[in-house]
Amino acid sequence: MSAVEYRFLEPLDVLFLRGNKLFGDPGSYGESLVPPWPSVAAGALRSRMLADDGVDLSDFAAGRVVHPTLGTPEKPGAFRVTSFQMARRLADGRVEPLIAPPADMVISEEEGKAKLVCALKPGTPASGVLSSSPLPTLPVLAESERGKAASGYWLTAGGWRRYLKGETPLPGDLLKSSQLWSIDPRVGVGLDVTTQRAADGRLFSVQAVAMQPGVGFLAGIAGAVPPVSGMVRLGGDGRAAALHGASSNASEPDYAAISGTGRCRLVLATPGIFPEGWKLPGTDAAGRFHMGEVSGRLVCAAIARAEIVSGWDLARWQPKSACRAAPAGSVYWLDELDATPEALRKLANTGLWGEAGEEVQRRAEGFNRFWLADWK
């Protein structure tokens, strides 16, 4: 089952999309992470598949049952998340993926609306300019007058097509976060574990995410066929989300054009859990990137502050190991690219993973996925 199945997860209630920060102490505040990690979709779909197949969850958690496609918690099977994005249902019923602007896009606004979109480009530092970057060039924003970067925007499918072609998206290709969801603060009460009653003086606040009608998440799954209808438990507290079959409706990079030009931008679609932090796996001390049948020279990178990926392991009933990750949207410029279109497509389908046994759980959950875009 090598074909990718797509599922649209449409929330039916507010969601608690918790990140890696602790909360629950008196006066603490729990922030929601939008979009959540791809492991949220992996957990929701795998739980539903186990329930549909009548698998005893305790036996599965203990490794006494081997599922045909999910394997066991210790040794996952063929199931893996290949993509996970925000999405919305259009009037004609199609599902449109929505992409957070990559790190090389700078958006300025006027009167609360996007006015100008600019792109960072690699530039050689002038003599005497010092930097902590180990790469030969730096991402530079060339603009005629100063402006303040704005945040909280999302690229439509049309804007994403332009980006993949090496063009700069237009202001009309952007949506504000407020058009997609709103934050609904909720107050929680700490419980006394002995009496199972509310504990005195233990009030805390959490962010609930209220999606606009028709807004949800689009997940791509390979190695298994998830259900196409019904509901799943999504995010913290297992809030209900409807499950729908969908197609990706996302533009695929022009691998032939990228191979012909010999350079590209590599954009992280999901957080990258890399052995050396921000650096692409397969990159040596000289900046040469080699993975599979693809090689090139890493010349520049635009990366936001690192994030910590964790989560809750239901099988072991304990927190997952915290991993430092390069955030989704990080951009890497590769020059001297040596790869056939087929090799580029194969690497994109596999993700940025090295040895077959490396982080098998995180691989199945959809981390280290990326897109390739033209670099003009």
Image: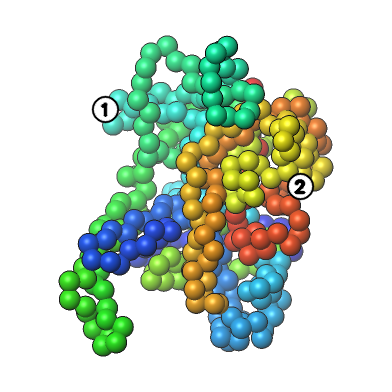
- The kind of secondary structure element at disc 1 is loop
For label 1, the residue is 111
Mark closest to the chain's N terminus, 2 or 1: 1
Please say whether residue 204 is visible from this viewpoint.
yes
Q: How many marks?
A: 2
Say which quarter of the image contains residue 69: bottom right
Quarter holding the C terminus is top right
Q: Is residue 166 above or below residue 295?
A: above
Pinpoint residue 68: horizontal percent, then vertical percent. Answer: 71, 76
Residue 325 in percent (x, y) is at 55, 49
In this rendered view, identify the residue nearer to me: 68 or 61: 61
Q: Secondary structure at mark 2?
A: helix
Residue 336 percent location from the top left of the image:
76, 27
Q: Can you say whether 361 is above or below 100 in the image?
A: below
Query: Residue at horizontal 63%, vertical 28%?
Result: 135
Crowding near the residue tagged with mark 2, few <14, some 14–19, many ≥20 C-alpha atoms within 10 Å: some
Residue 346 bears which disc, if any? Answer: 2
